[in-house]
Amino acid sequence: MNENIHFIVEYRVNDGMEKEFAEVRKKLMEMSEAELGTIAYEWYTSDGKNYHFYERYENSDAVVQHLDNFGKIGSDLSRVGIGSILSLYGPASQAVIDLLAIENTQFFSNGTGFSRLDTKG
């Protein structure tokens, strides 16, 4: 196993806020793409209102960096919808756990298996 941390986030766009959501999503995508430790930042929907975000980070330090950056524009996302981290996978540091302790997050730190994903670029 590696040190990667994965999130699954559930999010629902508030009624009438689809245009604003698209603007916030664009900002978040650009922010996350600029973070060197962000491996994947993918948002999935079947109806344009309900989303699951899949986020994968190189390690706990990358998660802390992302959360710090997210704090600068996260209120915009909260204004246009509601979300929560459903599950976090990987060996999260205590710092990451503490930062996400206010969520109803399930932490799964012990895993087995493999990934063919090259996390070093």
Image (spheres, rainbow, N blue to C red):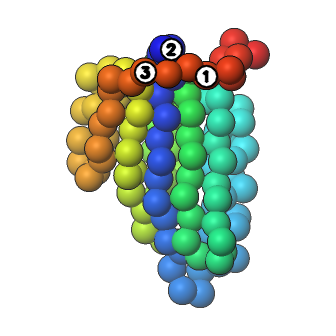
Instruction: Classify residue 45 by image quadrant.
Output: bottom right
Looking at the image, residue 63 sits to the left or right of residue 98; the answer is: right
Outermost residue on the bottom side: it is 16
Sequence order check: which comes first, mark 3 or mark 2?
A: 2
Which is more foreground, mark 3 or mark 2? 3
The C terminus - image quarter = top right
The answer to the question of whether label 2 and label 1 lie on touching residues, with beta carbons closer than 8 A, is yes
Using residue 18 as the reference point, say whether residue 84 is left or right of it.
Answer: left
Rendered position, 48 above or below 90: below
- Find disc 2 in the rendering and name its residue: 2
The residue pinned by badge 3 equals 112
Can you tell which of label 2 and label 1 is closer to the viewer? Answer: 1
Q: Position of residue 70 (x, y in %)?
A: 51, 43
Which residue occupies 50% across, 71% down? Answer: 12
The residue tagged with tag 2: helix, strand or loop?
loop
Residue at which label 1 appears: 115
Q: Secondary structure at mark 3?
A: loop
Q: Nearer the viewer, residue 117 or 6?
A: 117
Residue drawn at the location 43% of the way across and 21% of the way down: 112
SS for callout 1: loop
Which residue is nearer to you in this view: 16 or 115?
115
Other-residue count near label 1 (Cα within 10 Å), few / some / many at <14 / 14–19 / ≥20? few
Q: Residue 98, percent across and down?
A: 25, 32
Q: Position of residue 108 (x, y in %)?
A: 33, 33
The amino acid type found where label 1 is placed reads Ser
Mark 3 closeness class: few <14, some 14–19, many ≥20 residues within 10 Å: few
Q: Above or below — where is 117 with respect to 70?
A: above
